Amino acid sequence: MHALHKTILELYRDNGDRMYAGEPVTQLEHAWQCGRLAEKSGANAALQLASWLHDLGHLWVNSPGTPTLRGEDDLHEVVAADLLAPVFGQAVAEPVRLHVQAKRYLVASNPAYAAKLSQDSSRSLNLQGGPMSAQECAGFESKPYFKDALKLRVWDDLGKKKAWFEDSREDALQYLEKLMRAASS
């Protein structure tokens, strides 16, 4: 097993019970829900893993409380993508890197989308640059993994359901380990 695999599993074992800032789920529940939504949508192993690990940067940075309430953008998407790229490649890292931009894009291209954002996602949107301009949208659309990032973003928004965690904690982490092995090979 790669050292990063072990580190990721340890982060979820040690900090997975931390509440996801401003949401009714823990970090592990959110990751699991996003991964399950990707799986149920027929996503490949790389996109499933990206969905599981898109918020890994929050655990890695380990800022106390809710950074957005302090006016902080922890750049979790960049932190996670930079960690993931050397081990899992661009098909995992780039959707993770782009999922915040995907939110900005969706807010700009679909006004109804903004109304569906959670309170914390709305707060972080402002810290992350707000809705994209038309020029930024065109640039985002030209990125190789922008469609995967849009899918991940939708699963990210949907993966915040209280009491939806069908596996035991250990079964969930074993599945994550299996997925990491599949995406590494």
Image (cartoon, helix red, strand yellow):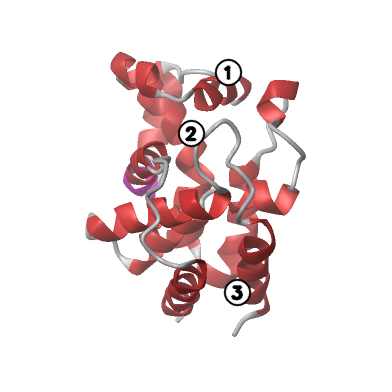
Q: Residue 146: say if magenta.
A: yes
The quadrant the C terminus occupies is bottom left
Cβ–Cβ below 8 Å for labels 2 and 1? no
Q: Position of residue 160 (x, y in %)?
A: 43, 40
Q: Who comes first in sequence, dot 2 or dot 1?
A: 2
For image coordinates 34% across by 39% down, the residue present is: 154
Residue 96 vs 153, above or below: the answer is below
For image coordinates 69% across by 22% down, the residue present is: 69
The amino acid at mark 3 is His
Q: Residues within 10 Å of mark 3 (few under 14, many from 20)?
A: some
Lateral position of residue 68 relative to residue 123, left or right: right
The amino acid at mark 2 is Gln
Query: Helix or strand or loop: what does disc 2 sit on?
Result: helix
Residue mark closest to the camera, 3 vs 2: 3
Question: Of all residues shown, which one is farthest toward the bottom?
Answer: 1
Q: Which segment is the magenta one? A: 144-149
Decide which of 169, 5 is in the foreground and name it: 169
Residue 126 image label = 1
Decide which of 184, 164 is in the foreground and name it: 164
Query: Helix or strand or loop: what does disc 1 sit on?
Result: helix
Q: Quadrant of residue 3?
A: bottom right
Q: Quadrant of residue 71?
A: top right
Return the residue at label 3.
5
Residue mark closest to the camera, 2 vs 1: 1
Q: Who comes first in sequence, dot 3 or dot 2?
A: 3
